[in-house]
Image (tube, helix red, strand yellow):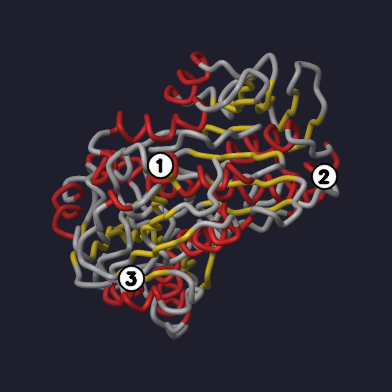
Amino acid sequence: MSWTGKNVLVLGVARSGRSAVELLLRAGARVCAYDRAPETLEGLPPQVKRLCAPSLPDFAEFDAVVASPGIPVAASAKLVPEVDLAAEFLDTLLVGITGSNGKSTTTVLIGEMLEASGLDTGVGGNLGTPLCALVGRGHERIVAELSSFQLEHARKLRADVAVLLNLAPDHLDRHGSLAGYGAAKARLAELQRPEDALVVNRDDAWARGIGERSRARVFGFSSERRLESGAYIDGADLVLAPQGPVELRVPIHALSAASRRPVANALAAALAARLAGATTEAISRTLARFAGLPHRVRDVCVRAGVRYVDDSKATNPAAAIASLLAQTTPIVWLAGGRNKGLAFDELAVAARGARVRRAVVYGESAAELERALTDACPVERVANLAAAVAVAAACARPGDVVLLAPACASFDQFKSFEERGRRFAELACALPEGVAAGGTGC
């Protein structure tokens, strides 16, 4: 489609919307930018018309409407998701990654593997740089994390290599049901062509089912069983065998801690990167040195023999459960925030199976979490994260871990999961060395 002279409305200009505005201007469109926050409209190019109002404008006067992912909009013939706009201008191989948990880590791993192979690689999408901002930069590869919000109305985005990691309940407040949430993510695979590659998690029923229906070339990975081809664990080794014959075998102990947590991310990344042109040498080096991402099961400090671990990115129950079960020492668990329409029943099962000494719940969902967990482990409810850290410090014993794995979004008390994680680290690192004494609360 030619955008020259088109009258285009951009909904939301905080991040991806601003990149869409800039791309549309370069394409010759006449742009009107809408946002509910007047400060967000500041700094736009002078030729952009600005519109600030509590409700969405009438679409009738516009030729097209480009929606930022965070703004829920009903499907419309005029609607162009930001990722579809970018797709019209992309002229390089695209690797797209979606799933409920592990997207960011897998995305960055793939990007580092391709860069280590000597390929100029842009990394972004839902992570960091918006897809529209990666257009025209001369990259040889683009690796994009893609959320359900970005994919739900996509019609043109085509990934040369698509990765489906897993599906667990999340964002049901927007999608209405697990089926609707899964259908949004499935768009990534549905838009592929027969010559494209689809990487699916053979251990996940949702991903496996999409692979069975796909018209693309399907490649699988599994951390639970040996496969005839793909990427899998064989004894104590990670094996990469896209076409069947083994191309790379790496001892799991040679992987960095971040690459092993969980190893499914490493398997998916190695397979996708290889299909996108990475060398086996680069894949092996990256798996050995990968440092991981902030706020994803990261040790922040040790105080009085107690480890404080930030997994603020565990914003749904499935991610929190994985974090709990990965710990090998007794846990004082901090959970809470804004629920995304999800049930907490499985958290109680995990709390019984993990070594949870006490759960400290806080924020909007504190009462709901307390009800769900009260028969599984000792629970204490507090108002906010600062109070939760104080209670945890008084309760934890030397050798314990205080784990922030909230199972909820951060937006009741913080702007983002990153801000929540930083605040947790500040609170933990400010504790005096003598706080933990196996104390009064446990």
The N terminus is located in which quarter?
top right
Camera-side residue: 186 or 366?
186
Q: In the rendering, at what x and y percent does residue 4 appear?
A: 55, 52
Q: CA distance from mark 1 to mark 3?
A: 22 Å
Q: Earlier in the sequence, mark 1 or mark 2?
A: 1
Camera-side residue: 390 or 336?
336
The C terminus is located in which quarter?
bottom left
- Disc 3 and disc 2 in contact, CB within 8 angstroms: no
Camera-side residue: 255 or 440?
255
Q: Determine the secondary structure under disc 3.
A: loop
Residue tagged by mark 3?
Answer: 414
Disc ID at residue 413: none
Q: CA distance from mark 3 to mark 2?
A: 38 Å
Q: Amino acid at mark 1?
A: Ser
Q: Is 405 situated left or right of 219 in this image?
A: left
Q: Determine the secondary structure under disc 1.
A: helix
**The residue positioned farthest toward the front in the image shown:** 5
Q: Earlier in the sequence, mark 3 or mark 2?
A: 2
- Labels 1, 3: front one: 1
Residue tagged by mark 1?
Answer: 148
Disc ID at residue 282: 2
Q: Is 95 situated left or right of 213 in this image?
A: right
- Crowd class of label 3 (few under 14; some 14 to 19; many from 20; radius 10 Å): some
Q: In the rendering, at what x and y percent does residue 218 appear?
A: 62, 19
